[in-house]
Amino acid sequence: MNNAILNHVSIRKFKNEPISKETLDTVLEGAIRASNTGNMQWYSIVVTTELALKQKLRKECHFNQAMIEEAPVVLTFCADLNRFNKWCKLNNTEPGYDNFLSFYTASIDATIAAQNACIAAESLGLGICYLGTTNYTAPKIIEILNLPKDVFPVTTVVLGYPDETPTKTDRLLLEAVVHDEVYCDYCDEDIEALYAEKENMEFYKELVKINGTNSLAQIFTEKRYSKQNNVAFSKTLLDEIKKQGFMNQE
């Protein structure tokens, strides 16, 4: 199996070293070879290398994370019905893709393309990091990147040569996520056993102590991804998705 997959780590510190056009094109070629629905390629990739634009994205969209500015390349993967819709209309047929299914499909295709790009990049010695902040600041990203109607940012990836060597992040064991033949639901004893290793890591024990919670699970539900924030951001996201022309069809 490709070592780029098994040895993946998120890189947040990058060398001040540009990525050659040839290398970047190889990464992007890997992205567009990704599987997609009906070979329609309902996605686009915005490549940002200009410092002033990266600084704007950093401050206004990605919670002022330094890696946005330091990485030589920022890739924003977008669900894109705009291009395909225009092609359909030019060929005298009316597209019917202003609905949830089409947005969902385009988002999946954009994500698969992003992962292909990441695997290609890591196989070439580059480092990557996905930015979940895209989900929280989509309206501002749309404005800054001049995304037209029927285009929506799905995820962002920073790309560059690593200036750090972090250890691999823990993952749940196969038996926690793989189900044979059909889904087998978890009993309480299963959950306790599957999460025991994670909960007993010194790193997470210290995290619980620092956050003043009684468990690691509480950090996720009360500190990192609270229901209140999830509901608020969900409303903003859904409103912007509709504003961009998706999910308007009754």
Image (cartoon, rainbow, N blue to C red):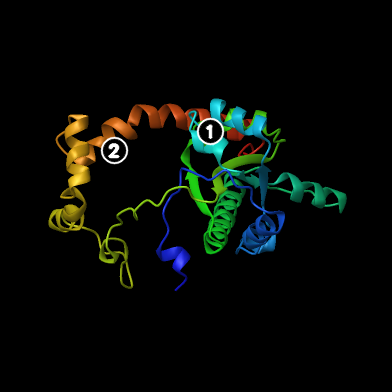
Left or right of 150? Residue 190 is left
Q: Residue at x 17, y 39 (%)?
A: 215
Say which residue label 1 marks.
Answer: 238
Tell me which amino acid carries mark 1: Leu
Residue 135 visible from this viewpoint: no
Dot 1: few (<14), some (14–19), or many (≥20) neighbours within 10 Å?
Answer: few
Nearest the eye: 164 or 167: 164
Say which residue label 2 marks.
Answer: 220
Relative image position of residue 18 (x, y in whole percent)? 64, 48
Indicate whether 29 appears above or below 227.
below
**Disc on res. 101:** none
Indicate whether 179 appears above or below 203.
below
Disc 1 secondary structure class: helix
Disc 2 secondary structure class: helix
Q: Residue at x 21, y 43 (%)?
A: 204
Residue 210 visible from this viewpoint: yes
Nearest the eye: 177 or 159: 159
Could you tell which of marks 1 and 2 lies nearer the N-terminus?
2
The N terminus lies in quadrant: bottom left
Dot 2: few (<14), some (14–19), or many (≥20) neighbours within 10 Å?
Answer: few
Tell me which amino acid carries mark 2: Phe
Quarter of the figure with residue 151: top right
